[in-house]
Amino acid sequence: VPVAAARERAKLMHDIYDATLETMHRHFFRREQSVLPARAMEDIFTDMARQSSIQTRWIAVNTKAMSINHEPETDFEKQAAKEIAAGKESFELVADGYYQRAGRISLGGGCLSCHSNQFASASTSAKYAGLVIRIPINDQ
């Protein structure tokens, strides 16, 4: 990659890791209660949006949404959830001044105890959530 792109990526990665470290310390080293990692990551999403204008959020794909905030809302998110549920690893769109990407997040056993009725079901199909990233762009 060109040096300018590498510099930009390194700065973004630094900011992400810094926000992650701060969030981990804030949420996971408290005696009174623990916080689910996916919920703690929403604080990272907020920190990164404030620093970079990049918006990130979870969406439910083929399991129950654990929050009404995780239901796919936009046409892009609804299509992304369908594509990921059908087996695609990711779905992207460039429109209206934004690059949007939704990527598959595999849900394992610990996740499924809440996100689905896995223990009462014989379903062996893979279960996913989605991670939507929305980046403002210049089409120049």
Image (spheres, rainbow, N blue to C red):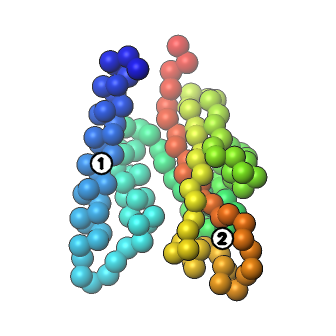
Q: Amino acid at mark 2?
A: Lys
Does any portion of residue 71 appear in the rendered image?
Answer: no
The residue identified by callout 1 is 17
Residue 30 appears at what percent x and percent y?
24, 76
Q: Nearer the viewer, residue 73 or 4?
A: 4
Q: Nearer the viewer, residue 134 or 1?
A: 1
* Label 1, residues with CA under 10 Å away: few <14, some 14-19, many ≥20: few
Does any portion of residue 121 appear in the rendered image?
Answer: yes
Residue 71 appears at what percent x and percent y?
64, 61
Q: Nearer the viewer, residue 75 or 103?
A: 103
Which residue corresponds to the image point at 33% horizontal and 40% vertical from the top-left? 13
Residue 28's disc number = none
* Label 2, residues with CA under 10 Å away: few <14, some 14-19, many ≥20: some
Question: Which tag is nearer the camera, tag 2 or tag 1?
Answer: 1
The reply, left or right, for residue 57 in relation to residue 104 is left
Quarter placement of the N terminus:
top left
Count the marks: 2
Q: CA distance from mark 2 to mark 1?
A: 29 Å
SS category of the residue bearing label 1: helix
Q: Are marks 2 and 1 in contact (CB under 8 Å)?
A: no
Which residue corresponds to the image point at 34% horizontal and 25% vertical from the top-left? 6
The earlier-in-sequence mark between 2 and 1 is: 1
The residue identified by callout 2 is 64
Which residue corresponds to the image point at 49% horizontal and 31% vertical from the top-left? 136
The reply, left or right, for residue 32 in relation to residue 73 is left
Which residue corresponds to the image point at 60% horizontal and 45% vertical from the top-left? 102
Q: Amino acid at mark 1?
A: Tyr
Is 119 drawn above or below residue 72 in the view shown?
below
Residue 140 appears at what percent x and percent y?
53, 13
